[in-house]
Amino acid sequence: MAGVEVVSEQGFRTDGRKPNELRRIRCKQGVFSHADGSAYIEQGNTKVLATVYGPHEIRGSRSKALHDRAYVNCQFSMATFSTGERKQRPRGDRKSTEMTMHMKQTFEATILTQLYPRSQIDIFVEVLQADGGNFAACVNAATLALIDAGIPLKDYVCACTVGFVDDVTIVDINHLEETNHIAEFTVAMLPKSEQFVMLEMSSRLHLDHLSKVMDMATKACKDVHLVLDRAVRDHVSEVWQQLGNT
Amino acid sequence: MAVDLRLSCRIKQKPTTIYKEPDHLVTPGDVITTDTGFMRGHGTYMEDDKLYASVAGTVERVNKLICVQPLKSRYSGEVGDVVVGRIAEVGQKRWKVDTNSRLDSALLLSSVNLPGGELRRKTAEDELMMRQYLSEGDLISAEVQAVFHDGALSLHTRSLKYGKLSQGTLVKVSPSLVKRRKTHFHNLPCGASVIVGNNGYIWISPTVNEEADSTGGFVQDLNPVATADREVVARLHNCILAMARHRMMLSDTSIIYTYEASLAIGSLVKDLLKPEMESEVVTMARERLETES
């Protein structure tokens, strides 16, 4: 991708967005009837499906049961057709294992697990189309699915990927921008209390720029929260009405 | 064999209605109150003297207690609830039963009526016989006897109306569609019995004569069921599925109304699974419920 500048002289990115502009987010809760909770999210061309089962009795080995809180089981997978080049296997490679671990840590910090001792909560996310910011989209989808399942959370978990290139911070980077070797920042945060639950940085960044990048990421996560909250409120209102309440 | 193929773009899209947001709707992380005079109920948590919501739903206040009830969640049992469950495991002096709860429920050997109604002598033999009474995969109806401190349920079947279920169909719906009522066992006029479990498990079976059933439900009647009866059961099954998909509350009246609506339309049992038929039947039943109540 040599020769293509990430941000043009006029201040626009390759897909025509401004540096602080998110991609369009479309989401839907309750897409599966057999799961306890499910959600589908599109962030631009990144499409993710999340399902949540539980809290239920520990399946598999009993030794995983925790006597004071619930055990959170995550699985991150990418469909073989999700990337430009067909993937060999959907899960189990090093990258997916790492993503799974990050997801688990993120949600163990946010779910009020102490309410469900000796139970298990399963979170399955599947990337259907990967166009950058996969982890962020997965976290957002899983949050919606958990809310749909009625599992108590401290707050929404909103995630966003932020890039830093040529003194400019760009939010919600897509695949094209990811391939340009820019400094990449993935944050997951609780937007209302402004607490960070996960932060990952993929390359070096000068300390002077850090606060600027963090501010931008916070702003982006809060924007994501607004969109998700609107979707949840609409969904709850619809279900509320259908259940025969006025 | 004929296959019914439709393009998804041809299915009539439901009109996008704007739903009015209910009062006191909260989502996770919303501050409910900063007043410290309130008690923390389900679906809320306290931090820095503020009361936050942890689930999405509407705020319910009973005197000083504030709760938020999610619209969909796992079954949380209360003593006296009627449940339908499936045996998951046979253990030491107890069966583990899957009841859609957050932990498997326990059915103690001491809280079942043994076959023939004989009194249990506490011997090692009947512990070894446990798998003969109920084995993995069997369906039972039971009542919640107690709730353990960790939230698991203890069941009992010490009544002739509870026990092993023999021939019929199970439908699983969301527990929030079932309200607690005086009775959950219904003999419908169409010739089927329905057990509407509080846990969202619904058992539909052809009605059998009461007087033949005096064994406490441990002997399964495996005689073939007449086709007409099977059709009634299947139609009820599809009606309840349609109701669940449209989030209609399940009670004996609403089930009968939906069943009769499906008959009035004259649809085949299998056609009830089509989305457009589903919504038509449910809308008819809803309208009738509204006019007659």
Image (cartoon, coloured by chain):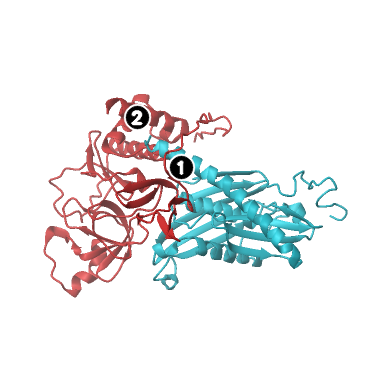
Chain colours: A cyan, B red
- In this rendered view, identify the residue nearer to me: A138 or B236: A138
**Left or right of A94, for residue A70:** left
Q: Label for residue A29?
A: none
Element at label 1: helix
> In the rendered view, does A9 fall on the left or right side of A245?
right
Measured from the top left, where is residue B116 in percent x and y? Answer: 13, 58
- Does residue B129 appear left or right of residue A5 in this picture? left
Q: Position of residue B134 (x, y in %)?
A: 26, 61
Residue B183 in the figure: left or right of residue B139: left
Measured Cα–Cα span from mark 1 to mark 2: 23 Å
Which part of the image, by quadrant, shows the C terminus of chain B? top left
Q: Is residue B220 above or below residue A58?
A: above
Tell me what residue is drawn at x 39 percent, y 67 percent: A118
Instruction: Tell me what residue is drawn at x 36 percent, y 55 percent.
Output: B42
Tell me the residue at 32%/52% (across/down). B65
The subunit letter for the residue under badge 2 reads: B
| Spot occupied by residue A61 in the image (x, y as percentages of width and height) | 44, 70
Name the chain letter of the residue that bears numbered label 1.
A
The answer to whether mark 1 and mark 2 are in CB contact below 8 A is: no
Residue type of the residue flagged with mark 2: Ala
Residue receiving disc 1: A236
Q: Where is mark 2, residue-wise?
A: B285
| Residue depth check, mark 1 versus mark 2: number of the one nearer the observer | 1
Q: Is residue B172 visible?
A: no
Q: Are marks 1 and 2 on the same chain?
A: no
User: In terms of depth relative to the viewer, which is nearer, B118 or A165?
Assistant: A165
> Vertically, is A82 above or below B125?
above
Q: Position of residue B271 (x, y in %)?
A: 43, 32
Query: Please, is residue A195 above or below residue A8 in the view?
Result: below
Q: Foreground: A57 or B262?
A: A57
